[in-house]
């Protein structure tokens, strides 16, 4: 089983819609959680950290469920510019390196 | 510098040749990481440097791969006797401390022909 699993998609969503992705992680010792965004042929960029209480940044909301070992990302009022691959990222306690999921591809349709 | 700088941005090399990839992290970032991403694949961890500690080399795929970090700043990833399966985008990232996200460079696209 992969340490971080994501639905690869693709998700094709009309502009203005709300879309949500889930990601599961296998190691219960995981400590830090992030969502990264990667545009085609570009490097990944940090979108937001995920906190235990859930957090929001504009149209983006991230949540963590430790009991079920998953994190989620909700995008409201989606824009064409939201089209990208969204990477779920996990960091284990005491381990410096981040483990990346293979990403969920999102395309916003005009 | 303002961001993580990698060079070259593109490298085409013949099978069997050695290549060196360079990474200049954000000033003050003590942690430096190398990952690679093959076409359509996720990010694969290669090596991690933290300050003066011994690097975590657990992700290096073979002994043809090595990396060093001089003076706690610039890092060089060396691939000896390149093979076609080494073709990928090699990404460097730096971080201020554990628990924070990384900032990635724009990568070196390596093509072995």
Image: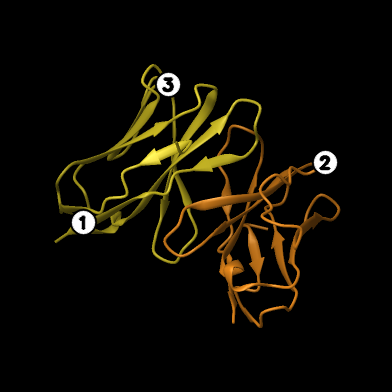
Chain colours: A yellow, B orange
**Chain label for disc 2:** B
Give residue A79's position: percent from left, percent from top. Answer: 22, 53
* Residue ID at (28%, 58%): A81
Q: CA distance from mark 3 to mark 1?
A: 29 Å
The residue located at (46%, 65%) in the rendering is: B39
Q: Position of residue A43 (x, y in %)?
A: 50, 59
Task: Give the crowd class for mark 2: few <14, some 14-19, many >=20 residues within 10 Å.
Answer: few
Quarter assignment of residue A73: top left
Element type at marker 1? strand
Q: Quadrant of the N terminus of chain B?
A: bottom right
Q: Is residue B54 shown left or right of residue B62?
A: right
Q: Where in the figure is residue A102, as x and y percent of width and height?
A: 42, 49
Label 3 marks a residue whose chain is A
The residue at the far top in this view is A67
Front residue of this view, candidates A22 and B30:
A22
Q: Is residue A40 above or below residue A28?
A: below
Callout 2 touching callout 1 (CB < 8 Å): no
Please report contact status of discs 3 and 1: CB closer than 8 Å, yes or no: no
Secondary structure, mark 3, is: loop
The local secondary structure at tag 2 comes to loop
Residue A101: in sight, yes or no? yes
Residue of label 3: A52
Residue B55 drawn at (x, y percent): 78, 44
- Number of other residues with Cα within 10 Å of mark 1, as a class: few under 14, some 14 to 19, many 20 or more: some
Residue sitting nearer the eye, B40 or B98: B40
Residue B54, numbered circle:
2
Q: Which residue is mark 1?
A: A108
Q: Looking at the picture, does residue A30 appear above or below residue B13?
A: above
In the foreground, A81 or B111 = B111
């Amino acid at each position: 089983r992969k340490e971080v699993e994501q639905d690869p998609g693709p998700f094709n969503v009309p502009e203005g819609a709300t879309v949500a992705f889930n990601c599961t992680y296998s190691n219960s010792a995981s400590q830090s959680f992030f969502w990264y965004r990667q545009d085609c042929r570009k490097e990944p960029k940090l979108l937001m950290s995920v906190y235990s209480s859930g957090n929001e940044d504009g149209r983006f909301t991230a949540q963590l469920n430790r009991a079920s070992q998953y994190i989620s990302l909700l995008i409201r009022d989606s824009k064409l510019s939201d089209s990208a691959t969204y990477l779920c990222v996990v960091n284990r306690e005491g381990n410096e390196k981040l483990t990346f999921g293979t990403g969920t591809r999102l395309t916003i349709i005009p | 510098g303002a961001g993580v700088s990698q060079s070259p941005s593109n490298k085409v090399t013949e099978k069997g040749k050695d290549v060196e990839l360079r990474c200049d992290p954000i000033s003050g970032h003590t942690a430096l990481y190398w990952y690679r991403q093959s076409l359509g694949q996720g990010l694969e961890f290669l090596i991690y440097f933290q300050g003066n500690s011994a690097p975590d080399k657990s992700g290096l795929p073979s002994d043809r791969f090595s990396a060093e970090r001089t003076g706690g700043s610039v890092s060089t990833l060396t691939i000896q006797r390149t093979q076609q399966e080494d073709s990928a985008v090699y990404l460097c990232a730096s971080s201020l401390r554990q628990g924070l996200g990384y900032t990635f460079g724009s990568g070196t696209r390596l093509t072995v022909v």
